[in-house]
Amino acid sequence: MTSPAAARFSASPFRARVAVIGGGLTGLTAAWELQRAGLAPVVFESAPRVGGAICAHREGEWLHELGPNSLLEGSAEVATFIDALGLGSRRLYAAPSAKKRYIVRGAAPVAMPDSPLSFVTTKLFSFGAKLGLVGEPWRARGPADGSESVADFVERRLGREFLDYAINPFVGGVYAGDPRLLSVREAFPKLHALEQEHGSLLRGAWAKRNASGGPKGRIFSFAGGLEELPQTIARDLGPAVRLKAVVRAIRRRGTVWEVESEGAGALGAIETFSSVVVAMPGDAIAALPFENVPGATQLGGLREIAHPPVASVFTGYRREDVAHALDGFGMLVPEVERRQILGTLFSSTLFPGRAPEGHVAITTFVGGMRSPELGRRDDAGLLAVVQSELAHLLGVRAAPVYTHVRRWPRAIPQYTVGYERYKALYAQIEATAPGLFFGGNSRDGISLANCIASGRRLALAAAAHGPAA
Ligand SMILES: Cc1cc2nc3c(=O)[nH]c(=O)nc-3n(C[C@H](O)[C@H](O)[C@H](O)COP(=O)(O)OP(=O)(O)OC[C@H]3O[C@@H](n4cnc5c(N)ncnc54)[C@H](O)[C@@H]3O)c2cc1C
């Protein structure tokens, strides 16, 4: 990050202290950029480890992710950031054999079409549904605001079958969400913009494809799993990262900010900062007192943001005990198929080094908005569900030789219809409280790429604010 503001403060003999609340990817990115710009960030992380939702687990030769599994290199910003961290050589792109994606239809995985010819011949969509697409470019635009749900948008433009067998499983895989509740503008802004700008998804996709010379955006992780990313950033930040440091209150005192925290050897410590970057989940923000900040009591409303529970269930099998070739990225399950899982990743196909020789690794997601009660089951209950579903769908014919379960009681914020009111609230409070900045996955998007962009945006804003007078 080299902005005029950053350059100004790196030249200043007085290094502005910036409190960064939350040591997930957003907060760590913000702190790293602030440090690079010559400011003095302090990261407060309540957990005994950095990374937030990013969390890998190694046991013997099994390596698996408990939270996010991969990052999309959809923008130059992500690639540049990874290279600047010195992680470029550790990056592992998804294997070419993981290109295929499966959707369950009629209780069996069907490969998604990936070319015009395979679209014509696929059994995933009926002839009538395919024919219906011909009229898409001539359908009227929907509302420009955030009032339309993903389901209404897709049904209106593409028809019911594409909603059921393409978008519904995709929304289950990305948000663990319900397309009837999510706002298309808030949850899928690029899709919404395509219609608004080009009047048609097909026309828009075609125009973008020609403009960019083809689809881009490769999926990647690292040799040691995604956790290499937060760990590398934290290593660079050194003592600027405080673990087990729980922020209890944020207070405005004239032109400076006080942060009250507990833990890391200090009980009820109060420190002064020039600015505060808040990179916590929405419900954690809702629970925090912001004193002398006009309108901050309204932040309590962030508690209403739905965060469904999701369980990530990792199972390892002997290769000969799984009939399916596992020749792809994974398999998503549409709600209309009435099964008990959201989808699975073929983890050992996706990245090398995830399972011992002669074995395969599968990560299955259970719960979400579709079936929250399933996501809360105990380990034995979740493993039973997963084993039974994988037996039906992938031909698993023996018990796993390795298992690991992780439950996320409040997994991913749902950008539902009307969500823009939360974003407007953040902007309104920032406008009346100079030096206070909000970001993270309750504001700037849920993907890890969004979190990197959010952290960089926050760092720029805090650097521009500079030291207090
Ligand atoms: C199961 C699962 C699978 C996912 N899969 C993918 C994927 O494959 N690809 C992808 O791009 N995204 C994925 N995501 C989404 C992505 O992982 C998250 O949106 C992202 O990691 C959020 O990062 P963050 O830094 O904004 O927040 P978090 O990671 O939630 O970090 C916030 C931090 O704030 C800390 N904190 C909270 N309160 C306090 C306090 N009072 N004081 C101090 N610290 C506090 C927390 O301990 C936490 O570490 C997935 C998410 C989940 C749960």
Image: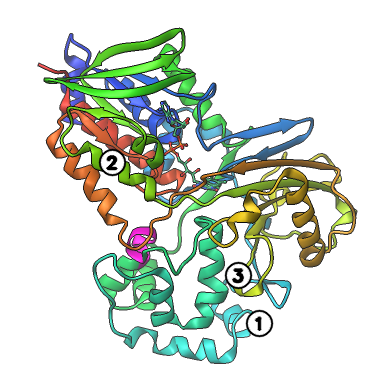
Which badge, 1 or 3, is on the more N-terminal residue?
1
Vertical order, 154 against 469 (above or below): below
| Discs 1/2, front | 2
Separation of marks 2 and 3 at Cα, in angstroms: 35 Å
**Residue 299 bears which disc, if any?**
2
* Residue 43 in sight in this render: yes
Residue depicted at x 67% and y 33%: 57
SS assignment at label 3 = loop
Ligand 1 within 8 A of label 1's CB?
no
**Residue 186 bears which disc, if any?**
none
Picture quarter with the C terminus: top left
- Mark 2 belongs to which amino acid? Leu
What residue span does the magenta drawing correspond to?
A: 184-191
Which badge, 2 or 3, is on the more N-terminal residue?
2
Residue 382, position in %: x, y?
73, 50
Ligand 1 within 8 A of label 2's CB?
no
Residue depicted at x 63% and y 79%: 124
- Mark 3 belongs to which amino acid? Pro
133 left or right of 31 in image: right
Which badge, 1 or 2, is on the more N-terminal residue?
1
- Mark 1 belongs to which amino acid? Lys
Residue that sits furthest to the left in the current view = 469
Q: Is residue 188 magenta?
A: yes
Residue 153, position in %: x, y?
38, 75
Residue at the spot of label 3: 334
SS assignment at label 1 = loop
Q: Quadrant of residue 240?
A: top left
Separation of marks 1 and 3 at Cα, in angstroms: 15 Å
Residue at the spot of label 1: 123
Disc 1 residue crowd, few under 14, some 14–19, many 20+, Cα 10 Å: some
Tell me if label 2 and label 3 are in contact, CB under 8 Å. Answer: no
